């Protein structure tokens, strides 16, 4: 898993991987790729950071990947992480962030809307989301709740896009085109929002 590999590189004495890949909003214009690369780095001083994120990914990742397919799952993960970075840029523009939490919350958001569409009970999942969001607001936790909220919103939106599917198998190609267009449109919207924020 890429996050684990990157973490191993991070904890090597003298490694500059963390500083090279984390997201710091003032650097957005010069190094926009940090909005994505920050998903794959975690706090080298706290092994619990990566453990909790990877545990959540192992729990929800395979289920969503099976339901969505590998390509759409990857799109969901990356878009959610990007959404978390955009939220940090908009709400906490001087805060450096790292970690897959925004992307993980995106998975939770998508899982919620998909489960609800299929008629499943999601009270427990909603409780998990609320509790994890609440932790980010506690003083002294040093958690970027903005990334959590941004990832959750974008993940839910991407999940809704993937649920937009005509019944039957005759329109698979057109359905894939619609989904790609909608996800691409959301990506452009996020980037335009980022650009506008940098100009303000």
Image (cartoon, helix red, strand yellow):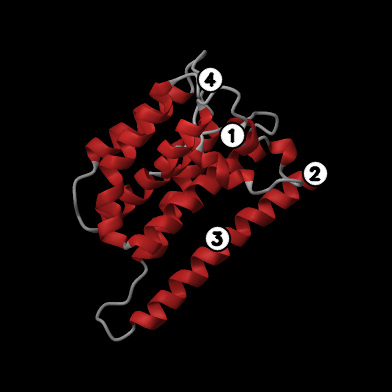
**Residue at the extreme left of the image, as rendered:** 120
Give above or below for 160 relative to 181: above
What SS does tag 2 mark? loop
User: SS at mark 4?
Assistant: loop
Residue 200 is marked as 2
Quadrant, the C terminus = top right
Q: Nearer the viewer, residue 51 or 154?
A: 51
Which residue corresponds to mark 4? 142
Q: Is residue 187 left or right of residue 158?
A: right
Q: How many marks?
A: 4
Mark 1 or 4, nearer chain start: 1
Q: Residue at x 41, y 51 (%)?
A: 156
In space, the residues marked 2 and 3 are separated at their CA atoms by 21 Å
Location of residue 198 in the rendering, given as x and y in whole percent from the top left corner: 76, 45
Secondary element at image label 3: helix
Q: Is residue 29 above or below residue 99?
A: below
Label 1 crowd (10 A; few <14 / some 14-19 / many >=20): some
Residue carrying label 3: 186
According to the image, label 1 marks what residue?
Answer: 17
Side of 145 where 66 appears, left or right: left
Q: Badge 4: few (under 14), some or many (20 or more) residues near its Cα, within 10 Å?
A: few
- The mark nearer the N terminus, 4 or 3, is 4
Distance from the alpha carbon under mark 4 to that under mark 3: 29 Å
Label 1 and label 3: CA atoms lie apart by: 29 Å
Query: Looking at this view, is 133 or 97 the one in front?
Result: 97
Tell whether label 2 touches label 1 (CB within 8 Å).
no
Q: How far apart are the alpha carbons under marks 1 and 2?
A: 30 Å
Residue at 67% in and 35% down: 24
């Amino acid at each position: 898993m890429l996050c684990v590999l990157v973490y191993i590189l991070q904890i090597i004495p003298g490694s500059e991987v963390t500083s090279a890949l984390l997201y710091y909003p003032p650097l957005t214009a010069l190094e926009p790729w940090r909005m994505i690369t920050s998903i794959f780095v975690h706090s080298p001083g706290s092994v619990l950071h990566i453990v909790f994120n990877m545990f959540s990914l192992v729990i929800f990742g395979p289920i969503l990947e099976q339901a969505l397919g590998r390509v759409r799952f990857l799109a969901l993960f990356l878009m959610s992480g990007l959404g978390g970075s955009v939220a940090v840029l908009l709400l906490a523009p001087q805060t450096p962030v790292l970690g897959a939490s925004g992307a993980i919350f995106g998975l939770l958001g998508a899982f919620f809307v998909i489960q609800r569409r299929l008629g499943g009970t999601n009270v427990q999942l909603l409780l998990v989301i609320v509790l994890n969001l609440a932790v980010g607001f506690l003083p002294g936790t040093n958690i970027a709740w903005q990334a959590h909220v941004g990832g959750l919103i974008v993940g839910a939106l991407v999940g809704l896009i993937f649920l937009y599917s005509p019944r039957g198998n005759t329109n698979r190609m057109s359905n894939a085109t619609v989904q790609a267009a909608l996800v691409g449109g959301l990506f452009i919207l996020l980037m335009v929002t980022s650009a506008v924020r940098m100009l303000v």
